[in-house]
Amino acid sequence: MDAQQNTSGPDITGLKIDEGSRNDRRGGRRLRAGLFAGLAILALTAAVIAFRGRTPVVEVTTARPAGGIEGTTLLNASGYVTPRRRATIAAKITARVLDVLVDEGMKVAEGQVLARLDDSDAERRLLAVRTARDATAALITNLEVNRANAEKELKRQLELEKAGYAAVQARELAQTSVDSFRAQIQAAREQVKAADAEIGVARQDVDNCTVRAPFAGVVVSKDAQIGEMVSPISAGGGFTRTGIATIVDMASLEIEVDVNESYIARVAPDQKVDAVLDAYPDWHIPSKVRTVIPTADRQKATVKVRISFDTLDPKILPDMGVKVAFLAEEAPGGQRTAPRALIPQAAVRDEGGKKVVFFVREGRLERRAVALGGVRGSDVEVMAGVNEGDIILLKGPEGLRDGQRVKTK
């Protein structure tokens, strides 16, 4: 019976894993995992040490003088430099351009010739009306001779009628002839006057072929070339020019900004303004409000404000972008601490509600709290903590700290 059980299937009792071998394998895996973790920690530590050993590169700026502009900033806005007098000079007649005597950037005086147009047709019309006028004037001379002769005949008929030798009909015919010649002479004189008026029109057409500057200024655009047709109205399917040149009166440059209607109450005529051109961010230009346009833009909910420069400069050009700060006037007897310097707003950092900046001294950062004043465009006034000429951090990587060594661009 036992023999039959032994031959019924294989004996698997010998396939058991030895408990000691199993423990050895688990220990090997744990050893390898620990080794890998140790290597990773060493690599991370080396990376941190290497990173800390690198000196970050930063961008710095210099604190600028505040410019002596008094007043607290009430409102900031942006706009463009625009001229009050800007004109695209066009011809009064349709003609072909013979010559353009100006170019961009050229200064012109009032009445200076800008271009000459083809005046051949206008000259022919002038000659025609002059000839017609002369012909009519010559006809008057002939009519006056005939009138004189008719008056003599009338005088003879009156004398014969008094003597009883002439009929009344003959005297009436003579009177009619005199009146007819007088009427013809008067009509001829009126025709001469009409011809003189036509001569004036034709002469004006000739003068219109010379295009002149209506005011002194600078040419900012040359719109027509020699050989092109110009006309006071658009014609020719777009092949006819309507302008010859654009002139700007540089003495009329001002700033035009749109102020939100919610803040327009802070703006008043003659109010002091600090203007900063986008092209010259370090240049603060004293200005003042010239006028507030008495209407609002319904679509944008803004009111247009025009600002005059206190002093014009050749660097100020039309259509330049500009940022302005409307300043509040100090009350009589009031004292206001003058700002020490101006720095870019990007240089100011917020740490727990405190405004701080980083000085750069001998290649190291120095953290310092600052007291700020009003905003002037992209700059901010510093009332305390920074002086004119200080070198401060403008841009740099995150995580910079006090005393850290840095390199400047």
Image: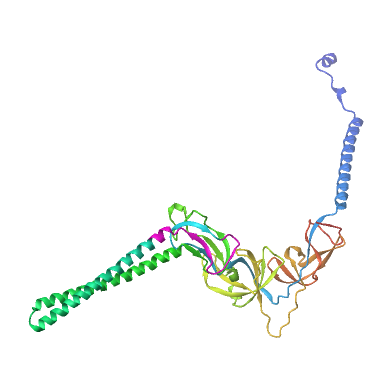
Instruction: Classify 322 as above or below 161.
Output: above
Quarter of the view holding residue 312: bottom right
Q: Nearer the viewer, residue 147 or 85?
A: 147
Q: Quadrant of the C terminus?
A: bottom right
Q: Quadrant of the N terminus?
A: top right
Q: Is residue 191 left or right of residue 237?
A: left
Residue placed furthest toward the bottom:
333
| Residue that appears at 88% across and 50% down | 49
The residue segment tinted magenta is 102-124
Quarter of the view holding residue 76: bottom right
Q: Is residue 115 left or right of residue 79?
A: left
Q: How many marks?
A: 0
302 within the magenta span: no
Residue 54, x across and y down, in percent = 86, 52
Instruction: Classify 100 as above or below 338.
Output: above
Q: Is residue 169 left or right of residue 362?
A: left
Residue 342, x across and y down, in percent = 75, 69
- Residue 262 visible in the shown view: no
116 within the magenta span: yes
| Residue that appears at 32% across and 64% down | 132
Residue 21, x across and y down, in percent = 91, 30
Q: Is residue 61 left or right of residue 216?
A: right
- Residue 207 visible in the shown view: yes
Q: Nearer the viewer, residue 54 or 163?
A: 163
Instruction: Classify 353 as above or below 179.
Output: above
Colour basis: rainbow
Q: Nearer the viewer, residue 404 or 198?
A: 198
Quarter of the view holding residue 390: bottom right
Residue 206, x across and y down, in percent = 43, 63
Q: Nearer the viewer, residue 402 or 340?
A: 340
